């Protein structure tokens, strides 16, 4: 169904039936009034004829309207008989239950061959076909058919052919009451397998075929059924650690603000809790993939994320944003970076029970994980948990489409985008209204499994920066504005309100409120705090000759936390070991210290320095160098590490890579060193290899085809001018056992083996389908002038559009592409609603903006306000999604849910949802509302959201 047809159908469903009854009533009323009036005057032939004509006309009108109502009812009935082809929008649980009950009645009626009453269809109007925006779900491909029952049973199903009726899928079944053992037994009896218990949300995850799911779902105690969506790591690119300094976290560390006592949960592939940088902060966790208490990272991603948040402040490696937190690992993704939404719900329940303050989510899915997942995030957020998630790596340098992934799209989650060193949005960073804040996301160094470090790009590494800053704010302490002991909303507001504004002024789809800023979030005044000192030291030469060189000189480099050289530091601040005989400063800010040769013996020696700042904080560094007895003496080199790595080749054979690290006596990489090795099999076979070390002192050897047995490597020699090998080889041994070949039998497959084979094939097909769906979602867009004009239902006019374009360029040259189109469409044709405004009305809307703000519109935010004012009439078509979102926004401001039966609350919700003005403007009410807003929030309204709330206060009765 194309967009035009979809819109026409919406109008039929929502307006045709109610309009006919109202029209008939109005007609009847008018007829009665006319007859009463006519009875009071003498009748003439002319008057009788006129009256007869009127009655005939009214009768004809009634007949036409009755025929129209009957036709509309027949069309609605036909829709149910033919099976609908588009996805229904999310509606409240109550409405879903009503729809499911009505559809069950319809199915029973069909089975009994009863006639379906026309009036019966009115109760299921919320489920009539609607056109979905591309950000909710990709459009159905031509020819794909989807049943009405399918859409009801599986709320978040995208396509009818997403899986076959015989294929096993995972679903989340949510009950109206607690899940009892009896209910789980009913699931098993119906052909399902319980995969996960989700007690806090009255739900279970079940593996079942869609065919058998129909039987299980017949239970009237079931509230909803969602596909248990697969979640996965966001696409990353592996490309110097700058992020912590970039957000000014160093100043917090120097004042011992490290997030002490704050519990942070990393929802990821687990954490390597044995890593030296993380072992001190690791507090526990759980593996929801393998269902055990050992959340060891078998991928590396989770460890990288954890290091950004909490890597130790120990003078080595990298330092995390909040190195004093209690770190929890919630493993919801497997070694391949994949998992299920049900594991995510179970992990949220686990975190809630243990009082986790902050959760980090560096994964995502383009498809809606379903109602139960959204509820899990919402309820835990209401319970006091702060959720922070990567916005996604689905962005583009060209497209401005909304591409934010789940769960970052949820209102209960902070969506984090990525910027580079220049504070420019990374092209891969997803855009959208959900983006709330940005953080470093390019070339970020952090910990990885096995004790090492790696460099990664992506919003996955941006989110943990924000999680770390949130932990610092928690740790320092923040006032509880609601007085309920839950600080997550206070922290969230602090982070966004203190962010460094980037891009266009105010919140935007690329940067949200801006770059997270530790100093501002913690209220630190940089001018009143002496910057921390960081020191490095290096000897002038790597080797000195005893009895020839008389002085050892070292260069000391001191910077502040912003990597700026620190000059004119007093000599008393330096302490050298051994003692230096002199110290002076160079022009560039470096310091030279000298030591007499008599203080040292032949061999590897060192000099250390400690520099103390004004607060007594000490920064230390050490340098090593070689003292040789003669010029002919060589510096020793050795193999510092040796590792075996097997690889599976495309032909099925196994090859073996052997990597050696070579360093000199100063523990520096020995580059360009020739290494000769022998490689032997215990059975007697040997190989010989020769290669040179690279710039990192590493050398690699590869055995093309490994045969079963145990291998040992022996270093035969190492050659480099001026260096001498120490003739040592680290202990090493590698045993290879050939994998058992799968025996292909001629016997026919058993029923169970056929099912397994079919499942494997179906899984492969599903992965291909999901990739195609994801590709569609990235390219589908509604943000252009032709589609906006089509939505207005008017004919395009190039001349009018050129005027709109020129005017937009002249007054607002900085508009983004998507809003630019909206403004052009507004100026040329009217608002973005189904009715267009005339030129005079549009001028009035702009003047209304000037009255409210004291200026003509120019920025993006200004034109957003203009469009809201232009839509300032009660909506012809209600939108449940917008009103539910408005109720949540109401709750965040007033700290209670609105009572829709209360006229003031209801009016406020409608204003927030649709940007309405009620009746004539009341300047006095708006001024009082402005003062009330200031009293509540402590600042005057400035953003579009602020002015939404001012209007809500002004016209809901709160200011009267």
Image (tube, rainbow, N blue to C red):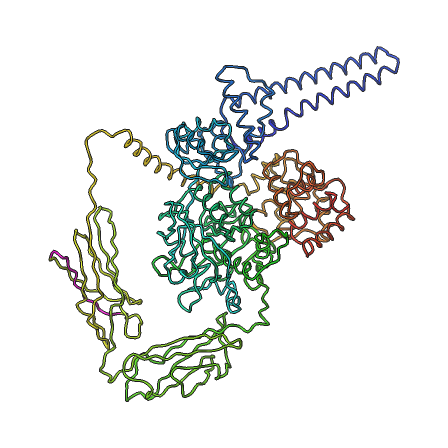
Residue 810 at least partly seen:
no
Instruction: Check if residue 674 falls in the magenta segment.
Output: yes
Q: Main secondary structure of the magenta part?
A: strand
Q: Is residue 261 visible?
A: yes
Residue 527 % position (x, y)? 59, 71
Residue closest to the eye, 48 or 907: 907
Is residue 400 or residue 96 the one in the foreground?
96
Please tell me whether residue 290 is drawn above or below residue 879 in the rendered image: below
- Magenta stretch containing residue 874, yes or no? no
Nearer-the-camera pick, 183 or 852: 183
**Which quadrant, please, contains the C terminus?**
top right
Q: Percent x, y for residue 904?
A: 72, 40
Count the labels in the image. 0
In the rendered view, tell whether residue 105 sits above or below residue 781.
above
- The location of residue 319, given as percent across then percent down, is 44, 64
Horizontal side of 821 relative to 191 (left or right) equals right
| Boundaries of the magenta span | 672-683
């Amino acid at each position: 169904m194309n967009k035009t047809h979809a819109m026409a159908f919406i109008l039929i469903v929502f307006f045709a039936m109610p309009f006919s009854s109202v029209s008939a009533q109005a007609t009847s009323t008018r007829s009665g009034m006319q007859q009463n009036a006519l009875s009071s005057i003498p009748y003439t032939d002319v008057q009788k004829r006129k009256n007869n004509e009127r009655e005939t006309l009214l009768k004809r009108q009634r007949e036409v309207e009755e025929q129209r109502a009957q036709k509309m009812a027949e069309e609605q009935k036909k829709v149910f008989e033919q099976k609908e082809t588009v996805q229904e929008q999310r509606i409240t649980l109550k409405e879903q239950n009503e729809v499911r009950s009505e559809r069950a009645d319809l199915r029973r009626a069909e089975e009994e061959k009863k006639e379906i009453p026309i009036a019966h269809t009115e109760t299921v109007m919320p489920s009539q076909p609607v056109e979905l925006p591309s950000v909710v779900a990709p459009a159905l491909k031509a020819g794909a058919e989807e049943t009405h029952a399918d859409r009801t049973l599986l709320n978040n199903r995208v396509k009818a052919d997403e899986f076959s009726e015989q294929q096993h899928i995972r679903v989340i079944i949510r009950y109206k009451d607690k899940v009892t053992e009896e209910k789980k037994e009913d699931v098993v009896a119906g052909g399902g397998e319980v995969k996960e218990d989700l007690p806090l949300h009255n739900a279970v995850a079940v593996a079942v075929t869609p065919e058998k799911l129909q039987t299980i779902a017949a239970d009237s105690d079931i509230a909803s059924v969602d596909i248990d969506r697969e979640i996965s790591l966001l696409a990353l690119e592996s490309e110097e650690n700058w992020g912590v300094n970039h957000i000014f976290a160093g100043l917090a560390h120097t004042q011992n603000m490290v997030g002490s006592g704050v519990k942070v949960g990393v929802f990821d592939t687990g954490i390597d809790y044995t890593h030296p940088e993380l072992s001190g902060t690791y507090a526990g966790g759980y593996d929801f993939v393998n269902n055990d208490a050992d959340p060891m990272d078998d991928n590396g991603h989770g460890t990288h994320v954890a290091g950004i948040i909490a890597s130790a402040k120990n003078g080595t490696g990298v330092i995390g944003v909040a190195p004093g937190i209690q770190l929890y690992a919630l493993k919801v993704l497997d070694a391949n970076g994949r998992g299920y939404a049900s594991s995510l719900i179970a992990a949220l329940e686990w975190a809630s029970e243990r009082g986790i303050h902050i959760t980090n989510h560096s994964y995502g899915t383009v498809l809606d994980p379903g109602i139960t997942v959204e509820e899990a995030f919402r309820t835990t957020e209401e319970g006091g948990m702060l959720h922070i998630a990567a916005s996604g790596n689905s962005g583009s340098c060209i497209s401005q489409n909304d591409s934010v992934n789940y769960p970052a799209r949820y209102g209960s989650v902070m969506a984090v985008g990525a910027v580079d060193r220049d504070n420019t949005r990374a092209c891969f960073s997803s855009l959208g209204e959900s983006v709330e804040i940005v953080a470093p996301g390019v070339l970020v160094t952090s910990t990885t499994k096995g004790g090492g470090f790696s460099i990664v790009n992506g919003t996955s590494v941006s989110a943990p920066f924000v999680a770390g800053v949130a932990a610092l704010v928690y740790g320092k302490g923040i006032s509880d504005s609601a007085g309920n002991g839950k600080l997550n909303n206070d922290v969230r507001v602090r982070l966004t309100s203190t962010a460094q504004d980037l891009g266009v002024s105010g919140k935007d789809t690329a940067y949200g409120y801006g770059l997270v800023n530790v100093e501002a979030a913690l209220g630190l005044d940089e001018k009143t705090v002496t910057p921390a000192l960081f020191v490095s030291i290096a000897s002038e030469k790597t080797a000195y000759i005893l009895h020839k060189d008389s002085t050892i000189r070292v260069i000391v480099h001191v910077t502040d936390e912003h990597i700026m050289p620190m000059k004119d530091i007093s000599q008393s601040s330096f302490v050298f070991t051994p003692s230096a005989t002199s110290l002076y400063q160079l022009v560039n800010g470096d310091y030279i210290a000298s030591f007499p040769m008599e203080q040292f013996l032949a061999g590897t020696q060192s000099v250390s320095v400690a520099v103390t700042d004004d607060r007594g904080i000490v920064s230390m560094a050490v340098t090593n160098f070689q003292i040789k007895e003669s010029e002919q003496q060589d510096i020793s080199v050795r193999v510092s590490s040796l590792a075996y790595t097997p690889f599976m080749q495309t032909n099925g054979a196994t090859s073996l890579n052997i990597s050696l690290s070579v360093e000199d006596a100063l523990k520096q990489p020995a580059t360009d060193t020739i290494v000769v090795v022998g490689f032997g099999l215990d059975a007697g076979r040997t190989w010989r290899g020769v290669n040179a070390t690279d710039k990192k002192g590493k050398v690699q050897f590869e055995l093309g085809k490994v045969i079963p047995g145990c291998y040992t490597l022996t270093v035969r020699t190492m050659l480099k001018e001026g260096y001498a090998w120490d003739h040592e080889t680290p202990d090493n041994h590698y045993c290879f056992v050939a994998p058992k070949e799968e025996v292909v039998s001629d016997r026919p497959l058993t029923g169970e083996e056929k099912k397994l084979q079919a499942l494997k094939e179906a899984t492969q097909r599903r992965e291909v389908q999901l990739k195609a769906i994801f590709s569609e979602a990235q390219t589908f867009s509604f943000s252009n002038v032709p589609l906006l004009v089509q939505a207005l239902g008017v004919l395009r006019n190039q001349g009018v559009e050129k005027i709109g374009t020129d005017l937009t360029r002249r007054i607002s040259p900085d508009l983004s592409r998507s809003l630019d189109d909206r403004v052009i469409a507004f100026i040329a044709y009217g608002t973005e609603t189904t009715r267009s405004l005339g030129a005079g009305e549009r001028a009035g809307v702009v003047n209304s903006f000037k009255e409210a703000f004291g200026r003509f519109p120019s920025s993006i935010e200004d034109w957003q306000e203009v469009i809201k004012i232009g839509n300032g009439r009660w909506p012809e078509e209600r939108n449940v999604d917008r009103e539910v979102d408005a109720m949540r926004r109401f709750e965040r401001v007033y700290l209670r849910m609105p009572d829709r039966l209360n006229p003031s609350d209801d009016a406020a919700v409608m204003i927030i949802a649709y940007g309405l003005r009620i009746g004539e403007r009341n300047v006095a009410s708006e001024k009082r509302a402005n003062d009330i807003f200031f009293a509540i929030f402590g600042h005057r309204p400035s953003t579009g959201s602020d002015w939404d709330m001012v209007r809500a206060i002004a016209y809901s009765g709160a200011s009267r």
